[in-house]
Image (cartoon, rainbow, N blue to C red):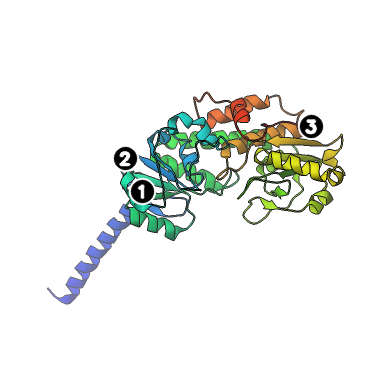
Amino acid sequence: MNNNKIFAIAAVVIIVLAGLSIAYVLTRDNGTEGNTIIDARGRAVEVPDEINSILAMKSCSLQLVSFFDAVNKVTYLDGTLGGGENLADPNRTHTFVLNDLFKDLPSVDTGNLEKVIETNVDIIISSEVSVSALNEYQKKTGIPVFAINADVEFDSPIFYDQLRSLGKLFGEEDRAEELIAGIETMISDIYDNVSPVEGISGYICGMNYYGAGTFLKTSGDYLPFKYSKLNNVMPPKIGGQPYDTDLETVIEKNPHIIFIDGMGLASVKSYFSAHYGMLKLMAAFSEDGGIYTTMIYKNWGTNWVNLLINVYYVASIVHSDEFEWDFEDKADEIIQLFYPGTDVKYSDLADAQAGEGCLSVD
């Protein structure tokens, strides 16, 4: 056989093998055959055929898992000192609602690789941002590490994409679509049925972000304002996270309504007392203004259940004559969307968590 024929046969074999390889990769990437699923950081993660044990580490990972039946397969909690789950903290809605499920689970320091390996879990869910750190952690533990994004909210397609990815991972695609449809329907219930609020502006404060909030911890990207079409007096910042402003700026912006995040309520009230002489000049402190508390927005990451409750509360204040629903009934519906069948109601959350729930402040 001459060299030309050998080369031709070899080329055909290479093409066939390449085609098979491409077909295999495509099959694996769809998350059904071969069990390779793309995570929130764009990594193709090979996952077990069956997942029976889960470790969720870093902020928001356990919260996202808690929206699925797979939460019953969590066998270890993140017990990292100074940065893990805290079942004694009722301000984290997921652990408050599911405390009975979590209270007897062992914890593991996720910084101790030897201890993590000993858990022998099938998969680790992590909100680590760095791809190299995720890959290194997976390599050292020998356990698949599936990344979620803790920094996205309802206005980002990434939030919904990761719900779908987790649905594939857990074999709960229908549950993922149920969650997505429920959230989108509730947001549309507000946004599609209101007009921009005329002549009124809002200011959010007391936001918990790397420390409890003060009157000057605010956000220009507050979704309850966006969906209620209420003008936010503060500008957005890159990344959309809460940031610090100054008193002179707030007074200059002169908001008509102030909303206080429950986590910072005590601090904000103290600030009111100390600076009332200047604050009383703002429209919010007049008879025509208003000051209200809201549910905790961030505690070890975004508290998505509370955020959606706040969407409805802000709408109930600035569009009080446009909706027939009762706010607390809607808040209960939201809790049921994320935790079907739970006995926990909005009133339970409001009583347990910092602040006073969603109320008018005298």
Quarter of the image for residue 361 reads: top right
- Of pointers 3 and 1, the one earlier in the residue sequence: 1
- Of pointers 1 and 2, the one earlier in the residue sequence: 2
Residue 182 located left or right of residue 169? right
Q: Mark 3 points at which residue?
A: 362
Quarter of the image for residue 198 reads: top right
Any part of residue 307 in sight: yes
Separation of residues labelled 3 and 1 (CA atoms): 50 Å
Residue 176 located left or right of residue 21? right
Residue drawn at x 24%, y 68% as measured from the top left? 11
Q: Residues within 10 Å of mark 2 (few under 14, many from 20)?
A: few
Q: Residues within 10 Å of mark 1 (few under 14, many from 20)?
A: many
| Type of the residue with mark 1 | Val
SS for dot 1: helix
Residue drawn at x 21%, y 72% as measured from the top left? 7
Q: Nearer the viewer, mark 3 or mark 2?
A: 3
Q: In which quarter of the image is the N terminus?
A: bottom left
Q: Name the residue under label 2.
A: 50
SS for dot 3: loop
Any part of residue 27 in sight: no
Q: Mark 1 points at which residue?
A: 116
Residue drawn at x 87%, y 34% as measured from the top left? 287
- Of pointers 3 and 2, the one earlier in the residue sequence: 2
Where residue 196 appears, x then y in whole percent? 76, 40
Residue 94 located left or right of residue 288? left
SS for dot 2: loop
Taking 294 as reference, is 327 above or below it? above
Q: Residue 124 carries which label?
A: none
Where residue 260 appears, x then y in whole percent? 71, 40
Where residue 293 appears, x then y in whole percent? 71, 35
